[in-house]
Image (cartoon, grey):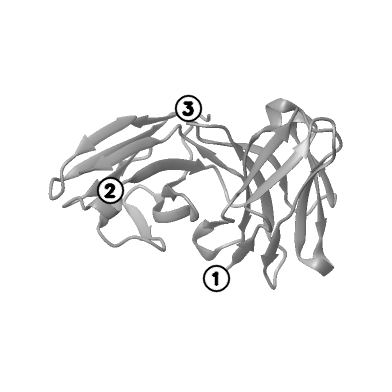
Amino acid sequence: DAGITQSPRHKVTETGTPVTLRCHQTENHRYMYWYRQDPGHGLRLIHYSYGVKDTDKGEVSDGYSVSRSKTEDFLLTLESATSSQTSVYFCATRQGENQPQHFGDGTRLSIL
Amino acid sequence: AQSVTQLGSHVSVSEGALVLLRCNYSSSVPPYLFWYVQYPNQGLQLLLKYTSAATLVKGINGFEAEFKKSETSFHLTKPSAHMSDAAEYFCAVSESGAGNQFYFGTGTSLTVIP
């Protein structure tokens, strides 16, 4: 959807290791978002970006950082992964203020 | 901050029956409203959106939703359920400004009984 590619699609790692998830878009959308999806919680916003090098925190940002050095790429980093960060992570993009968000296919991350 | 409430985390309907999925939001200003569908192991796909034009919005796959300001509701309906409609459905709200954030409901899982 909207040319959004998330990588990797699946990852298993150990507690305490750093993890970086990548979101790449080809639509030149200004806004990009990272969510996590957990049973019973729906989608919760981690961080979002409203332009190159412009980012802000969402409701569950602790333990996560992001970077956006180019319009097309938005990286999510877990500096030291914990088991509570086991989840499915979705990237989304949005062209403008009254436009819908478009989602990638998700990354399933397991932290053992 | 906005809040979005989806009544009923699980809804079951018979094939051919009416589908009604409920969504209520909290907002003091006219919001932008969206419904998304998620099939297993996939991302969210846009079903329909309301952006202050007609209050009855038609979407893909025969779904429609009606914006009722007095009730702060945006319920999703489909006259006749099909087996392929079984999925998770999310209501979302966005306000102008406010960092362009979306606020999602916790989702409703729709089961269609043959």
Task: State yes or no: discs 1 and 2 in contact (Cβ < 8 Å).
Answer: no
Percent x, y for residue A40? Answer: 50, 54
Chain where mark 3 sits:
A
Task: For mark 3, give the secondary structure.
Answer: loop
**Which residue type does callout 3 highlight?**
Gly
Chain where mark 2 sits:
A
Asked where in the image residue B72 lies, by quadrant, the reply is bottom right
Residue at the location (76% across, 61% down)? B73
> Do badges 3 and 2 share one subunit?
yes
B83 versus B18 height, above or below: above
A105 versus B3 height, above or below: above
Q: Is residue A72 visible?
A: no
- Which of B4 and A50 lies nearest the eye of the viewer? B4
**Which residue type does callout 2 highlight?**
Ser
Q: Residues within 10 Å of mark 3 (few under 14, many from 20)?
A: few
Percent x, y for residue B92? Answer: 62, 53
Number of the label disc, if any, that sits on residue A3? 3
Number of the label disc, if any, that sits on residue A67? 2
Number of residue marks:
3
Task: For mark 2, give the secondary structure.
Answer: strand
- Which of A6 and A96 lies nearest the eye of the viewer? A6
In this figure, which residue is indicated by the disc labeled 1?
Answer: B1
Q: CA distance from mark 1 to mark 3?
A: 30 Å
The N terminus of chain B appears in which quarter of the rendering? bottom right
Horizontal side, residue B69 vs residue B104: left or right: right
Q: CA distance from mark 3 to mark 2?
A: 20 Å
